Image: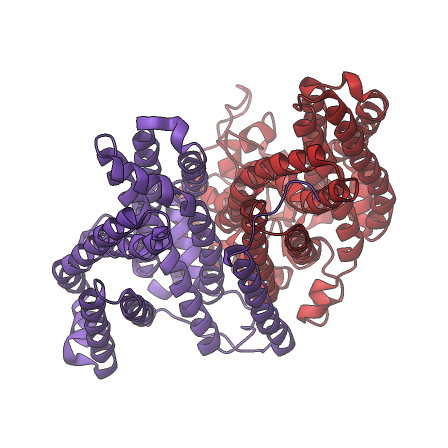
Amino acid sequence: MTSNVIPGPVPIPLPAPLWLIELLQVFTFVLHLVFMNLLVGGTVLLTVCSYLGRSEARYRDLTRRASRVLPPIMAFTITLGVAPLLFLQLVYGQYFYTSSILMAWLWLAVILLVMLAYYGIYWFSMQHEELGPRRFWVMLVTTILILHVMKTFTQNMVLLERPQDFYPRFFTTTVGNFLGPHDMLVFARLSHFFLAALALGGLGLAILSRSWRADSPDLADWARRYGTRWFQIGTGLQFIVGPWFLFSQNPNMRRAFLGGDRLDTSLLAIAIILAILAMAAARKSPAVSVFAIVGTISLMAVIRHLLRLAYLDPHFEALPVQGQWVVFAIFVVLLLAGLATIGWMLYRLFRPAPARTASV
Amino acid sequence: MLGGGIVIAIIAILHVFVSHFAVGGGLFLPLTERKAYRENNPALLEYVKSHSKFFILLTLVFGAVSGVGIWWSIGLVNPEATATLIHVFVWGWAIEWVFFLVEIASAFVYYYGWDRLDPKTHLTVGWIYFGSAWLSLFIINGILAFMLTPGSWLETPSFWRAFFNPSMLPSCVVRTAVAVALAGVYALVTASTLRDVGLRVEVTQYAAKWVLVGTLVIPLAGIWYIASLPPMAREISMGAAPAVTIFAGLSLFFSGLIVTFTYFGPYQNPRYFNLTSAFVIAVLALSSTAVTEWVREAVRKPYIIYNYMYANTLRLEDVPRIRQQGVLASAKFVHFHKVDPQKLAESGEDVFRVQCASCHTVDGYNSIRFAVKGWSGEMIDYQLVHLNELKGFMPPFVGTDDERRALAAWLINLNPQPVTREPVTPGVQVGSAETTTPGAAKP
């Protein structure tokens, strides 16, 4: 009965071996995660600072300067999210589409909410001075919208790993009206991501503040310490939420990460050690901290992928492979060329150069 | 209430209207910037600068997010077709993602670089933006054209055959011309708000040329595009389906109005052109986009991927098997995996959900209750047996005789029956066994 109600994949071969697609999925997901964390953490941080900025000038200076980097962060969070979702749909489409359809309205609302949040960010950034104290409300609403999107994503990603729940759900809720799972695992996962975002937002501020040193050394120094504190508190609290998240997993999965499986346990242990290193290095050497925390994020993305494989294992149907190698090679060449082009443009934008004149 | 199709249509039409501007505007910005440098015209340069702000606020936010929105909505409404496209074109999409990445990055660098980059580098960034935006259109256009003309991919599946399909090139030319015309339309809007009268007149006339050039190329490329379509798709747009023909006519009508208004308005009399007139042209352009995209979608019926998958996501290759085994047997999300004679209408509702709900709602858009109003049981059954023959834009009914009768039983219960007829109750067979043979069907 179960196999009859769990959707199968489309009968078209995979255009590359599974390992390659999954590697790309995890790699692009890490890129998305970095920007997503900066976005979520950044908006929360700027909401808090906008509130405090009503009475303290240094918070106002901080929000004014930091608000400029939010639009590109938002743009790259979205753009870098497209690739992992594409590869996810290629391999796990049958689960993803079904879970999305069950909560269709909530899922579709993501588009509208992201659009509104994006305009909120532009409003905050472009009209920062004109908004005055109202900027707190703009950022608060924007942050709530973004957090709601984050919650919807978490719910859908949890639901897609539970294909055994799809058919019973079909009987209990009108298709499309399901408001997503609301259990301990969802909240633990959400809290874990939220804290990671606060930490990365803080670290992002600490790094960004370095570019303010030339004209506002005091502000830059204070913002670096302030951002580092967010990073350390956010990461430190993971030592409470992390175990909660681990213990909300299915007992078999939990055991695998607590010594049951050597690879799983080692990955988790290294990720935690790197997070501790990142915390310790944050004040003295931010570069080490960035490398360590990107290492943690990458390992966590791998762990998350292994968990998905384990949850879907009883239902997963492998497809035959018929490699489209020429197109793949073109993709790789274009990706490298594209990254080089972006690198060149950013280099030209940020290198010190005399300002242009209006007319030529 | 809202059918899936209408959700996709709303998002897609608005997206097309903005995303083509993202491409055409990408050509407009560096060309106009270059013009300003060559003519040593700082006022024009200031206009390009302010236009670029409007441009990124519209294209980077609404354009980019609504593009993701189309992906969201097609996955919800037509997961099988979306999954098929992803399996065939995943590297194409990955390549498009690279262009998208460069497009977004270059748009930011272009906008934030006005005061930081030297003119030559700034222009180069503008060209990088246009190149990546157009290449993004090139890839998506190939995938979209594939749905209507999969061509030789049907015999020999390969990425290249799928991508370089018969209507890909003409469709790409049409879309590029649309992008140029829309660049002009949006420029008319921003130009009409300029305070400096001399500059307003200059930019208005300049933008009008973009609209006229784009709009004059569209019909020429359009003829080429129509010639590349499957014969049935051509017939549907040229008389076989009145609604589609009317919309195709409206598309020409709106385009004609745009050319006339633009020629006699901003091109001939730029001095009298104002924001209201610019909005009139923009609304006409949106209307033209809406009806044209609607026609392009409509002529693909009864398929979602021509000659491969019907609009209700049934693969043609699966039809013989499903006729034999039944549509409920292989369906996942149904209450009944075979017709329950005691619950005939309820079983029929499941058949409706699997086979009809991709396009029909019960009471909302394309309402099935309205479609079968006044029909007798015999009429419904006859229609189901001959569905694709009587309504060329609909797929055939695919299922067992029992499933068809169950669907008919559910359909007839949707509307109150005339007093002369005995009410149909679940379990009562509608139609008769003979109707399964089309030749023997009772009218």
| Residue B84 can be seen in this image | no
**Residue that protrudes farthest toward the bottom in the picture:** A262
**Residue that protrudes farthest toward the top in the picture:** B272
**Residue in view at x 54 percent, y 30 percent:** B369
B356 or B372: nearer the viewer: B356
Image: A220 above or below B95: above
Quadrant placement of the N terminus of chain A = bottom left
Q: Is B267 situated left or right of B324 in this image?
A: right
B202 or A182: nearer the viewer: B202
Residue B387 position within the rendered picture, expressed as x and y whole percent measured from the top left? 67, 43
Q: Which chain is red?
A: B
A179 or A293: nearer the viewer: A293
Image: A353 above or below A57: below
> How are the residues colored?
by chain
Image: A169 above or below A120: below
B235 or A187: nearer the viewer: A187
Q: Is B321 situated left or right of A104 in this image?
A: right
Q: Is A348 situated left or right of A43 in this image?
A: right
Which of the 4 image quarters holds residue A189? bottom left
**Residue in view at x 13 percent, y 62 percent:** A239
Hue used for the chain lettered A: purple
Number of labels in the image equals 0
Q: Is A340 situated left or right of A48 in this image?
A: right
Residue B239 position within the rendered picture, expressed as x and y whole percent measured from the top left? 83, 36
